[in-house]
Amino acid sequence: MNPITNKDVVIFDLDGTISAPKTPMDQEMSALLSRLAETHHIIVISGASHAQLKKQFLTGFNESSTSFEKILLFPTCGSQCFQYSDGEWNERYADRLSEEEKEQIFESFEKIFKQVNYSHPEELHGEVIEDRITQITFSAVGQKAPLEKKELWNKEFNAVRETITQELQKLLPNHEVLMGGLTSIDVTKKGINKYYGVKKAEELLRTPIERMLFIGDDLRPGGNDEPVLRTGIEAVSVTSHEDTKKLLAKWLNI
């Protein structure tokens, strides 16, 4: 059975699902999603900032042929939502971190780095700990690191990232601490994750979970897509954005 036949909304993860990490969506994917937007609402939930979502996702579309009114963006793990109307992307809500919370999070990262004897790589590409307003994100080799650098770091140090995440959660019991992508750790307000994003989508679109489908590459236990399963949403696991393209082409009879 075609899983999108009885759905009104298709929700996507970004990195590893729609495109390679921090890489602009290609034209084949944009054409498939434009076709999907003719019949379904499309939502993207990602740990990426709003600026990164625009750069990585929106710039791939032909604005004259794509119905942006059918697309919602949920950056920073669903702690924000942007919807298109009157020719621009407008913020629907934002669960901002206070200055006190941000200070606590930054200090907690430094404490854990010392606790686990973690040293940053000598070569960094951009910010390592970034204030995304509603989320603080640690990127081990920097926000602007090329994919191959992230893949190399992940192969060698992902176990260390898991330890940092676990220890950081102990220091920040009133916040959500989750790994994202290949090198990131995201910190938001407590309870804000992709589960929260799906529930907010249900509220904003007035569409029941049963009429939604989620597609992501990290639905494993502890993965950053895994929280959506607690909503009861039907979910499809993919291995890469190429896998997603094959499924969409099949479902759309292209």
Image (tube, grey):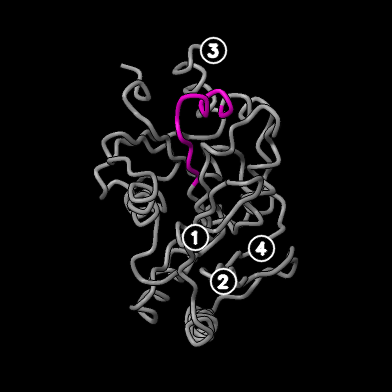
Separation of marks 1 and 3 at Cα, in angstroms: 33 Å
Rate crowding at label 1 as few (under 14), some (14 to 19) or many (20 or more) other CA atoms within 10 Å.
many
Circle nearer the N terminus (3, 4): 4
Res. 43 in view: yes
Give how far across and how far down residue 87 sits, in percent.
66, 45
As helix, strand or loop, the secondary structure at mark 4 comes to loop
Label 2 close to label 1 by CB (< 8 Å) = yes
Give amino acid for label 1. Gln
Circle nearer the N terminus (3, 2): 2
Give how far across and how far down residue 96 sits, in percent.
49, 72
Give how far across and how far down residue 227 sits, in percent.
33, 53
Which mark's residue is nearer the viewer, 3 or 4?
Answer: 3
Separation of marks 2 and 1 at Cα, in angstroms: 10 Å
Task: Establish if 68 lies above or below 138.
Answer: above
Circle nearer the N terminus (2, 4): 2
Task: Establish if 145 lies above or below 136.
Answer: above
Residue that badge 2 annotates: 133
As helix, strand or loop, the secondary structure at mark 3 comes to loop
Label 2 close to label 4 by CB (< 8 Å) = no
As helix, strand or loop, the secondary structure at mark 1 comes to strand
Residue 254: give its label.
3
Residue that badge 4 annotates: 141
Give how far across and how far down residue 244 sits, in percent.
50, 29
Q: Is residue 167 magenta?
A: no
Q: Residue at (59%, 38%) from the top-left corner? A: 68
Rate crowding at label 2 as few (under 14), some (14 to 19) or many (20 or more) other CA atoms within 10 Å.
some
Give amino acid for label 2. Ile
Find the magenta span and give its range.
33-44
Name the outermost residue toward the front.
86
Label 3 close to label 4 by CB (< 8 Å) = no
Residue that badge 1 annotates: 80
